[in-house]
Amino acid sequence: MIADEPKIKVALLQNRQEARINLNGEFIFSACGMISGKFIAHCSAGYVYLNNASGTQIEKQKEIFLFAQEGATFTVPDIKIGIDFHWQQNQEQTFRGDIAFLACRNNSFNLINIISLEDYLASVISSEMSAEAPLEFLKAQAVVARSWLVAMLEKKKSSSVLTEKKTVRENEFITWQDVNDHQFFDVCADDHCQRYQGITRILSANVAAAIEDTRGLFLVSDQEICDARYYKCCGGQTDIFSTAWEDVFVEYLCSITDDAETKPPILSEKDADAWLRSKPPAYCNTSDKKILQRILPSFDRETLDFYRWQVIYKRRDLEEIIRKKSGIDVGRLENLVVVARGPSGRIYKLRIEGSKKTVIVGKELEIRRWLSPSHLLSSAFVVSTEREANGTISRFILDGGGWGH
């Protein structure tokens, strides 16, 4: 457990050669006292240069820190959100807290926001869902997000934490992502960790109430804070930790039915076919626009068919997607064969059979990445095909369920 509220280092921009920033209020800057206004940072020869709006250099260091005074905020005009997902876009976002420019490799720098844990969470819960969501929804999200963050920070302190996230054998590519990919900051600001999109979304009194009412509350198992992972939509059944991440058993991250009536886990391809080609009752099975408008951020509401969905590819198009995403030319795509699924139906090993090469890919996020120009909504899908008169596959049809891990 934690005794004091920590400061969180959040990467707003990573590996940038240049960035603009507007200081709305006064920030303490060691080189010249107080500063405010518009600035441009760029990196060269391992140093970060900070110039004012007229182009005058005011600092050159490997690390530059700006400390916010009372009421000060800062705005970054071009933050990319939803990186590599179908909702990717640039947004202008405004933040509280201190700022760090940290030089890194390849003549680039990271822009870091240093902020207290609870202020960070206020932004997270109003970025992961709408600030207009019911208070109890926001409180639940606050507890889950706080638990995940602090469990992750504690795990990072352990020297036994895995740093290798990729297993490559001959024709087998198994990859998963986790927060230990980040060495010079605690979390990123995007879906890889948790969405953190500044103060512009914190528009309701419920956000402040949710943080205050749950302050210091965590999910706990065996006296340890839970590494709480969450979905946008489970698709009717949640999965286990090892389907998406490391091959370990996490007792509290078990598979449960998202409904009052418990349903059995997916144990066979016959089960998966029946499950994913139907729409069984579930709490997340809704397309009610009024409910979704109150719960989801605006850009998430552009995707309404998340409980059950279908993607159709021409065979040649899917071959090209796989080649671009994997760097592997499998030749003419002949089949997609499920090797292993989790209890929710999410595939974590998929065999891609081609005329030139056959490979196995995993885990769930890598499968989603290889089979889409951005990412599939989830890896819970079944495959069917359409064929030409000569028997050659012309189209692959993926019928899937859920959105997220």
Image (cartoon, helix red, strand yellow):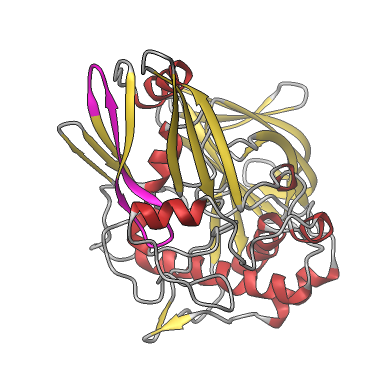
Q: Compared to 32, does 231 lie above or below?
A: below
Q: Position of residue 325 (x, y in %)?
A: 41, 26
Residue at image position (44%, 35%) is 384
Q: Position of residue 104 (x, y in %)?
A: 43, 34
**Can residue 21 be seen in the rendering of this structure?**
no
Q: Compared to 387, does 306 lie above or below?
A: below
Residue at image position (84%, 60%) is 203
* Quadrant including the N terminus: bottom left
Q: Position of residue 194 (x, y in %)?
A: 56, 55
Q: Is residue 118 left or right of residue 269?
A: right
Is 52 a magenta residue?
A: no
Marker count (numbered): 0
Q: Quadrant of residue 356?
A: top left
Q: In terms of secondary structure, what is the magenta stretch mainly?
A: strand
Residue at image position (59%, 67%) is 117
Q: Quadrant of residue 368?
A: top left
Residue at image position (79%, 59%) is 202
In the rendered image, the residue lying farthest to the bottom is: 223
**Can residue 386 be seen in the rendering of this structure?**
yes
Q: Is residue 201 left or right of residue 197?
A: right
Q: Magenta region: which residues? A: 339-358
Q: Is residue 293 left or right of residue 95?
A: right
Is 347 a magenta residue?
A: yes
Q: Position of residue 370 (x, y in %)?
A: 41, 32
In the rendered image, the residue lying farthest to the left is: 170
